[in-house]
Image (cartoon, rainbow, N blue to C red):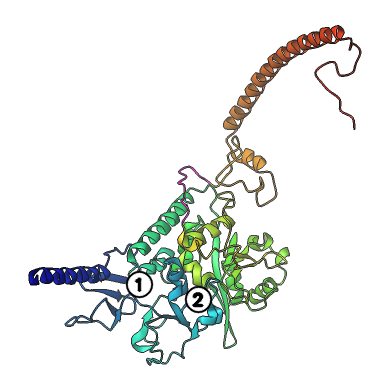
Amino acid sequence: MRANLFIAVAGALFATQGLVSAKCSFDQISVDTNPGFQITVNDDYKLLEDTIANVKYGLYCDSQPSGVDGVDRWFKVPVESVGIRIPIASGFLEAIGMRTKITAAESPGNLTNICLDTSKISTLNDASGNDENSEIDVIFSADASSDANKSVRLPSDDTLGPLQRAEWIKFVSSFFNQEKSAASLFTSISESYNCHSKNMQNLKTPPHAYWVEYSDNSGKNSYKVVTTAYQKELLAGAGATNDTKEAPSDSSDQAKFQEAVKDADYVFDQTQLTKFGQRATEWYKDFGYEDPQNSDVNFLLQRQIWRTDGYTSKSGISNFAEYGYVRPDLVLQDIISVIVPVYNQSHSRRWLLWLGGTNEDTELISSNNYNCESGWMSAVEKCVALTDFDGTIDEDNGDSANDDKDKDNDGKDADENDDSSKDKSSSSHGRAGKIAGGVVAGVAFIGLAVVALHYYNRHRRIVRRRALSEGGYGQENIGLHTRYSG
């Protein structure tokens, strides 16, 4: 009896140990883009090293390991209560299905995620370097020391490329033991981004684009051509020529800045504009364009000025910093839809705002464009590789990756433009083929008409005989057609 009891107790202990071990089993994942962090998995803990800020975090399940050198702060995982001081953290948690873990934020009212009940999210105490938010397990911030032992830094500048920044989803997911699902999502995002980018690399006429910014710090004007990795890689990935010019050494020289961007076909702006409803006018004034529609600058004449704050909350807060950085594949498709409009017309732009019109056509985040049960933040559409796409419409087939309503930017018929750019011999072969096809179709039509006429006359004779035999001769309903009145 005692032996059986011992076996039962031992079995229970073993099963319990197995459950604990399963709970603390960490997934080993790779880091692919040199994003500025490393993950090392051990038997009972894992190390996350922020190589940019030179901070090392230790994560464990049961008890904090001893004798581990070089760890700046430890966290028990999975964490249950999260505070955020940086918008991208909300986007990462939305993408990995951990939004309910957000219990505090620096400015809850500025969060644009409609799936959050901000009334239940408390406001974090001011960042003072002290542990004043003791009820929170971890606080994601732009500063590694904002909240003493609770703060974890996430990148907040654009020195990382689009995929490098997005890969931090693996870093964040480690605090929830969700590395495997995060790695799978990032792989899909990366494949989609690289596929669309590769499709843009054989454009017949690559557009020229700049990312620009104006600022007025302490009353001093500054004009910049932004060439940090994030912006430059997005433009290059969208097929724009990437020989973007550096802004003049004197950033306050407006005339030299205007000369530097004069050859742009498209301009993407990240200036902090404040006059909502009149931001186009504000932009022209900031950059010194007094009569844009009568200038000799192409992007002004074509009104090709774009921003990333076209998707906002009801209070006008842009969603881009929260969701856009997490999904670079969608941002890239937004840009492609502007500068190569014949590529994929089925894509619906999310973040880009056109400053060329009289109205600011922003879209409010709502249940009409985001489903909290199955949101697009965690869903990646498959990209189809196009090995021969050159940015033009196929004249013979009348289609492409995208038919831009059969018009180009100048309002001309796409067929007309394609005719002028194709080789004459190819065009003559195409016309000859169409003529031959027309002749064959005509002959076939005549043959069918003869057969139909034969059976028509035969039917009329039969009907006439039947009508005569029934005494109905001369009625209007004799024949193939019946007239209805009423």
Question: Residue at (19%, 80%) from the top-left corner?
Answer: 68
Q: Kindly state the secondary structure of the residue where label 1 is placed.
A: helix
Which label belongs to residue 189? none
Residue 86 place in picture, x, y as percent? 46, 78
Residue drawn at the location 58% of the way across and 30% of the way down: 425
Viewer-nearest residue: 140 or 75: 75
Q: Residue at x 69, y 46 (%)?
A: 412
Q: Nearer the viewer, mark 1 or mark 2?
A: 1
User: Is residue 385 rendered magenta in the image?
Assistant: yes
Pointer 1 local density, CA inside 10 Å: few below 14, some 14–19, many at least 20: some
Q: Is residue 238 visible?
A: yes
Marks 1 and 2, the one that precedes in the sequence: 1
Residue ID for mark 1 = 176
* Residue occupying image coordinates x 66% and y 21%: 441
Amino acid on which disc 2 is placed: Ser
Given the image, on which type of amino acid does mark 1 rest? Phe
Q: Which residue is identified by label 2? A: 249
- The front one of 423 and 214 is 214
415 lies above or below 141: above
Residue 421 relative to residue 230: left or right: right
Determine contact: label 1, label 2, CB under 8 Å.
no
Secondary structure of the residue carrying tag 2 is loop
Crowd tier of the residue under label 2, counting other residues whose Cα lies within 10 Å: few below 14, some 14–19, many 20 or above: few
Q: Position of residue 279 (x, y in %)?
A: 67, 73
Start-end of magenta stretch: 380-390
The quarter in which the N terminus is drawn is bottom left
